[in-house]
Image: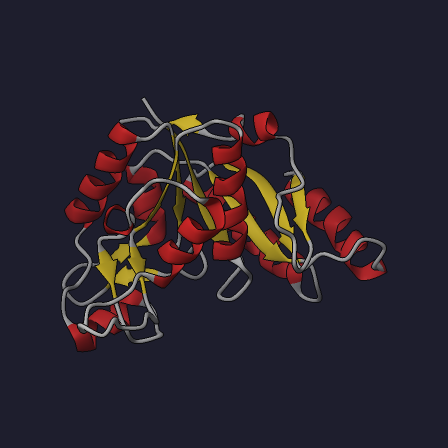
Amino acid sequence: MSRNIFITGTGTDVGKTYVTGLIVKKLRESGADAAYYKAAMSGNERRPDGSLIPGDALQVKNMSGIRQSLEEMCPYVYETAVSPHLASRSEGNPVRMETVLAGFQKVCEEYEYVTMEGSGGILCPLCFDEADIRLPEVVKACGLGCLMIADAGLGTINGVALTAYYLKEQGIPLKGIIFNHYKQGDVLHEDNRKMCEYYTGVPVVACVADGDTELSMDAEDLKALYETAEK
């Protein structure tokens, strides 16, 4: 049975996919059979044949070197760079919960460690017109705990604390925080790290600097954050 975790962020463009790539790479290099999953991706480019490239999945695959095929990684891929619920409004193919869960279950049956990445922040709507599907519903349906990715710079205390509070209200375990764009010795970044830990009671388990190609975290400590999904 696979062990799994959900990657959320304080918002869009905090570097979730980049950090997720480092996480999955660390798992693979430790000997784990690692996989990636994302319910919906927006803002993707097309191949010459017109098919959409799941860009986030491709980035994680290239960074990590995992054996998993792109076709297994994401059931819903959109071209428009907006929330999935809005992209599907113009492009069709709205997200359906049963399809997301079936794809996740299939990946869990084949791989040892599965890392699911969210779209945008934790409140990102996946579908709205046909059904109201939000990321927390997916996380809870899959029985996942979370790792939160946050930018190390100005404004992160508010974003981290509010996200942590919402996860707690939803009954979703927050296992750790990872700071991205972190600069060792930067007074603001180091204070943000301390304040976020103080306000949330959750440890910053790793810090990623620009250009890092390795996650500064022991592989066994990383694996310990993953849990067997409750079905």
In the displayed structure, 66 sits above or below 128; it is above
- In the image, 187 versus 140, the foreground residue is 187
Q: Locate residue 82 relative to residue 23 in the image: left or right.
A: left
Q: Locate residue 18 relative to residue 70 in the image: left or right.
A: right
Way the structure is coloured: secondary structure
Total numbered badges shown on the rendered structure: 0
Residue 186 % position (x, y): 83, 59
The residue at 58%/39% (across/down) is 176
Q: Locate residue 92 relative to residue 151 in the image: left or right.
A: left
Residue 84 % position (x, y): 29, 66
Q: Locate residue 28 relative to residue 210 in the image: left or right.
A: left
Residue 30 % position (x, y): 53, 29
The residue at 37%/61% (across/down) is 124
Residue 164 % position (x, y): 55, 47
Q: Is residue 102 visible?
A: yes
Q: Is residue 165 visible?
A: no
In the displayed structure, 184 sits above or below 3; it is below
The residue at 32%/67% (across/down) is 42
Quadrant of the drawing holding the N terminus: top left
- In the image, 66 versus 197, the foreground residue is 66
- In the image, 62 versus 16, the foreground residue is 62
Quadrant of the drawing holding the C terminus: top left
Q: Quadrant of residue 125?
A: bottom left
